[in-house]
Amino acid sequence: MRKSTHPILRETPRFGGDFPNKSKSLLRPSRRTKRKISLLEIFLMAVETLWSNKIRSGLTMLGIIIGISSVIAITSIGQGVQKSTELQIEALGTNVMLVSAAAARTGGISQGAGSSSTLTWEDAQAIAKQVPAATAVSAFLQRGNIQVVRGDVNIATTAIGTDLNYPAVKNIQPETGVFFRQADLDTAKPVVVLGSKVRNDLFSVSENPIGADIRIRGNRYSVVGVMESKGSVGPQDLDDVVYLPLTNMSAQIVGNNALTGVAINGFWLESSDADELEAAQFQVTNVLRLRHHIVPPKLDDFRVTNQVDIINTFTNIVGSFATMITAIAGISLVVGGIGIANIMLVSVMERTREIGLRKAVGATSSAILSQFLMESIVISSIGGAIGIAFGIAFAYAAATLFKFPFIVSLWSVIVGFVLSLIVGVLAGGIPARNAAKLDPILALHGD
C-alpha cells in the first residue's frame, strides 16, 4: 500500500508493537504518534481545501470583495470631490466674504438670498469706506436666463452687472481684451465682457470677438473682453456668464427697483487674509444695521457668508454622505461574514468523517480548530486584497471620468484589510470550534 503523504495521515502507527491494546489503537494513538502541525502545513491544507472548491470559495469571497471595494472607492471618491471643491473655492479666494440682500417672499415662499432689493450700491460704497478690514468691495446685480443673440445664434446665460473691483475680488481676469473701464461705468455704456463658454457658443474658433456686436434683451452691446476659464463651483458654471457695467445692468436689463440708489443683489468683500474675515463680518453687520436702522430684535435684511463657511459646510455635507454610504458598505461586509460562516458550517458537516479520522490518528482539537480558522482567514484575506484592488481601480476610473483629484488614503486601505480579517475570524470562529469539539467516534459513524 502506498504511504500517505498527508501531514496528519502519515503519522498513523503500524499495528503490532506500537500499541499495547490493539482494540483501542484506532481511537487512542500512542503518544509517539502525536506531532504538532506547523502553521505552514495548516495554511497549505486550507489552501488545498479551498482550491478544490473554487466556485464555492469564490462566491464566499464575493461579499467581502463588494464590502471592501465599496469602502475604499467611496472614501476615495468622497475625498477627491471634497478636495476638488476646496480647490475651486480657494481659487476664488478664501479671504472673500459675500454679503447678500434678504430673500423676497412670494406667497409665503422664499425666493432665495439676494432676491429682495434691501441692499444698494451706496451700501457697498459705504462699506468700502467705513470697514477697515475690507481691502476691496465689489457690488453685483445678477439675473439668470438672459437671452443673448449674435446673428442666428441665440443662447440663454447669466448676466452679472458689477463694478471695476470684480476681477480682483473674484480672482478672475480677462484672457483677451479688457474689463470695462470707469468711464463705461459712469455713463452706463453698453459694453460686455464674455465668459469663455459664451464666447465659444457665439463665435467660431477663428473669429476674434473683440469689437463685435451682440444683442442682450434686444439691446446692442459691444464686446470688449473675454474672461479666462474658471470652470464650475457646485451647480454654477463660472464661464457661462456675461459681465456688464453695473449702471447699465440696472438701467437696461433689470430696472432700478430700489427706493433710493442702485439696487444690488449683494457685494463681495475682500480682506487682507482669511483671519480678518471674522472682524470684517462684525464691522459689516454693524455698518449695515446703522444704515438700515435695524435695532435688535428686528431681523437683519441682509446675510453674510464667507468662503471658509462654504468650505466647512460642503466638507460636512460630503463627510456625512460618505459616512452614510460607508455604513451601507459595512452591511456588505456583514453579509460577507454571514456567507463565510454558512460555508464553514456546511464544510464542517460535509467533512465530519474526515475530521473524525484526523482526530483518531492523532490530530488535536487545536489543530482542527486552527485549520478551519485558517480557511476562513484565507478566504477573507484574499477577498480583502481583491476588494482593495477593485476599490482603487473604481476610484481611479471615477476620478478620471469626472475630473477630480484621485486620492486613496493609506488608512482606508489598512482599515479595509483589517476589517476583512476580523470578519473572517469572527465568521469562522463558531464553525471551527464546532469542528474541534466533534467526538471522533461519532464523527467516524457520520452522526
Image (spheres, rainbow, N blue to C red):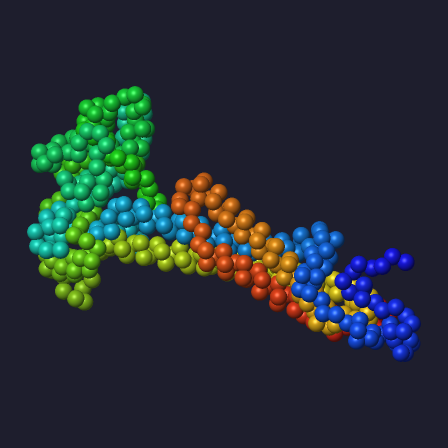
Image position, residue 175 (x, y; %): 23, 32
Quadrant position of the N terminus in the picture: bottom right
Q: Is residue 217 above or below residue 333?
A: above
Q: Is residue 328 above or below residue 198?
A: below
Q: Quadrant of residue 18?
A: bottom right
Q: Is residue 262 above or below residue 60?
A: above
Q: Quadrant of residue 217?
A: top left
Q: Nearer the viewer, residue 395 or 229?
A: 395
Give the residue at the far bottom of this rendering.
21
> Is residue 282 shown left or right of residue 418?
left
Image position, residue 371 (x, y; %): 70, 65
Image position, residue 410 (x, y; %): 45, 55
> Is residue 318 shown left or right of residue 95?
right
Q: Quadrant of residue 237?
A: top left
Q: Nearer the viewer, residue 405 or 49?
A: 49
Q: Is residue 443 visible?
A: no
Q: Nearer the viewer, residue 429 or 356?
A: 356
| Residue plotted at (85% across, 69% down) | 13
| Residue plotted at (10% across, 46% down) | 261
Q: Nearer the viewer, residue 183 or 167?
A: 167
| Residue plotted at (29% across, 36% down) | 229
> Is residue 427 shown left or right of residue 402?
right
Quadrant position of the C terminus in the picture: bottom right
> Is residue 98 shown left or right of residue 181?
right
| Residue plotted at (40% across, 44% down) | 404
Q: Is residue 44 visible?
A: yes
Image position, residue 21 (x, y; %): 90, 78
